[in-house]
Image: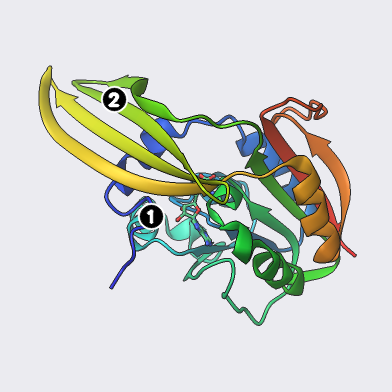
Amino acid sequence: MVVDKGYEKSAHLYDIFDNKDNITFFLKYGEEAETILDIGAGTGRIAIPLAERGVKIVCIEPSPSMRKEFLKKLQNRPELEDRITLVAGDVQTFRLAEIFSVVFLSGSFDHIPNRDRIISFQNINRHLKPNGKLIFDIHIGNMKDSPLLLVDTVKRKNYEYKRFIGTKILPDNMIDVLLVFETYKQGKLIEKIEQRSSAFTTTQTKVHQLLEETNFIIQKEYSDYHYSPFYKGDSLLIIEAIKN
Ligand SMILES: C[S@@+](CC[C@H](N)C(=O)[O-])C[C@H]1O[C@@H](n2cnc3c(N)ncnc32)[C@H](O)[C@@H]1O
């Protein structure tokens, strides 16, 4: 049985709403690297543009629906076949025979429960070459309970897509997230999906401790995908660390 961790019902809508401007950011690391591992690769939003530029990339993704969307995008793209390998797996438990010069964890860290973070980062470390790089992003900062609110509207041809988000803070830094997606065709509601997801908040200090305990050295910290430095109070923390 597949456990829905927040993407099973809504994977077909993922790319419509995730329009983060981070492909160029990841491409910089991709072009420097011999081998790349993208953990929690989702629909291939980052991996596919990298492969289109000639980068070879191995992707780990636990969600069958996200993998299905990823594979759909690879149909009729035979030129990408030997550049992308998509593997079903989870950051904590995946095992590959290969080790990599760069690992990406984009948009996935927040989903890893605090209790599983050490084991997950030990596993990542095991899959890196000496001095290999780990690049990951984290949402930092105070989260509050919020009622369900409309956060995005996207229009495409005859379709309009709406996304609503509500959050509830639970004990142990856990956030219960309710996402509601509505699709309208020519003004008529044709699909409504309710999707629950969990995230786990942290602080910069705790992430530093995690990296130290799992044998990483921090090289750089950014607050956006244009390499702006991170300052206390920023809500996005992007870390570039190397295997110690
Ligand atoms: C916000 S999406 C980001 C997808 C992609 N990295 C991107 O930037 O477009 C988070 C992804 O992390 C995956 N994920 C969640 N928990 C995971 C885990 N324990 N191990 C690996 N991936 C996980 C989800 O299935 C989802 O595809």
Location of residue 195 in the rendering, given as x and y in whole percent from the top left corner? 30, 44
Placement of 129 over or under 103, stated as above or below: below
Q: Nearer the viewer, mark 2 or mark 1?
A: 2
- Marks 2/1 in contact by CB < 8 Å: the verdict is no
Tell me the residue at 62%/46% (across/down). Answer: 53
Q: How many marks?
A: 2
**Which corner quadrant of the image does residue 56 belong to?**
bottom right
Which of the marked residues, 2 or 1, is nearer the chain's N terminus?
1
Tell me the residue at 43%/50% (across/down). Answer: 43
Residue 198 disc label: none
Location of residue 210 in the rendering, given as x and y in whole percent from the top left corner? 77, 58
Placement of 80 over or under 129, stated as above or below: above
Q: Give the side of residue 168 with respect to residue 224, left or right.
A: left
Residue 162 disc label: 2
CA gap between label 2 and label 1 equals 20 Å
Residue furthest to the front in view is 171
Which of the pair 156/232 is nearer the observer?
232
Dot 1 corresponds to which residue? 66
Q: Is residue 162 visible?
A: yes
Which of the pair 120/233 is nearer the observer?
233
Callout 1, which amino acid? Met
Q: Is residue 133 visible?
A: no
Location of residue 54 in the rendering, given as x and y in whole percent from the top left corner? 63, 52
Q: Give the side of residue 40 with respect to residue 222, left or right.
A: left
Placement of 162 over or under 35, stated as above or below: above
Location of residue 112 in the rendering, given as x and y in whole percent from the top left corner? 56, 57
Tell me the residue at 57%/51% (across/down). Answer: 172
**Residue behind label 1 places its C-beta within 8 angstroms of ligand 1:** yes
Tell me the residue at 74%/25% (across/down). Answer: 233
